[in-house]
Amino acid sequence: MARKRFIVELGTGVDLHGEDVTEAACRAVKDAISSNCLCGLMEIVDLKDPGQMEVEVLIATPRPEEVDTVQVASMLPFGKTSVTSVQGGMAAQGLCVPQIAPDCDQIIVANAAVTVFINQ
């Protein structure tokens, strides 16, 4: 069987007040997958079980070592998943809101590339 790439979806996620790279990464994955329907997998490729697809997630954040990849993977409803976290994204000056998260004034931006593979 040959492993073939079916689709690549891109997304952006932001944590405005908590400087939480995992939260931004989860939102980036949600953004990437929330406006597509992979009906071609079932109707054209004849995939019987969506759990058979392989999903690779590439996350870029300012602090990749802090990303909880298990939590990011949990954003995907189907497939065998893997998550890689790399340097990227953005940290921009924001506003500290002590009632939400004290001592943080950075806006964290994460980017996600979600790639779906199938074995044919």
Image (cartoon, helix red, strand yellow):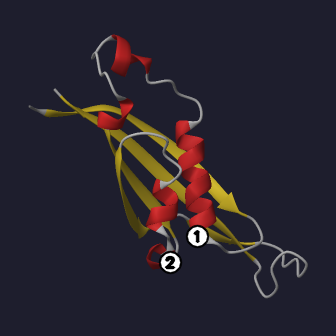
Q: Callout 2: few (<14), some (14-19), or many (20+) C-alpha neighbours within 10 Å?
A: few
- Dots 1, 2 in contact, CB < 8 A: yes
Looking at the image, tell me whether mark 1 or mark 2 is earlier in sequence order: 1
Please give the residue where the numbered disc 2 appears in the rendered image.
66
Question: For the residue marked with disc 2, what is the amino acid?
Answer: Glu
Q: CA distance from mark 1 to mark 2?
A: 7 Å
Q: Is residue 31 above or below residue 93?
A: above
Residue 48 shows up from this direction? yes
Please give the residue where the numbered disc 1 appears in the rendered image.
21
Where does the image place residue 57, in percent across and percent down from the top left? 39, 52
Q: Residue at x 57, y 67 (%)?
A: 22
Q: Can you tell which quarter of the image residue 78 is in? A: top left
Q: Residue at x 78, y 88 (%)?
A: 103
Q: Give the secondary structure at mark 1.
A: helix
Q: Residue at x 50, y 71 (%)?
A: 67
Q: Residue furthest top?
A: 43
Q: Is residue 16 above or below residue 1?
A: below
Q: Residue at x 36, y 11 (%)?
A: 43
Q: Callout 1: few (<14), some (14-19), or many (20+) C-alpha neighbours within 10 Å?
A: many
Horizontal arrangement in the rendering, residue 44 relative to residue 37 (left or right): left
Question: For the residue marked with disc 1, what is the amino acid?
Answer: Val
Where does the image place residue 15, in percent across and percent down from the top left? 70, 64
Where does the image place residue 62, in percent across and percent down from the top left? 52, 73
Q: Is residue 76 above or below residue 18?
A: above
Horizontal arrangement in the rendering, residue 4 relative to residue 34 (left or right): left
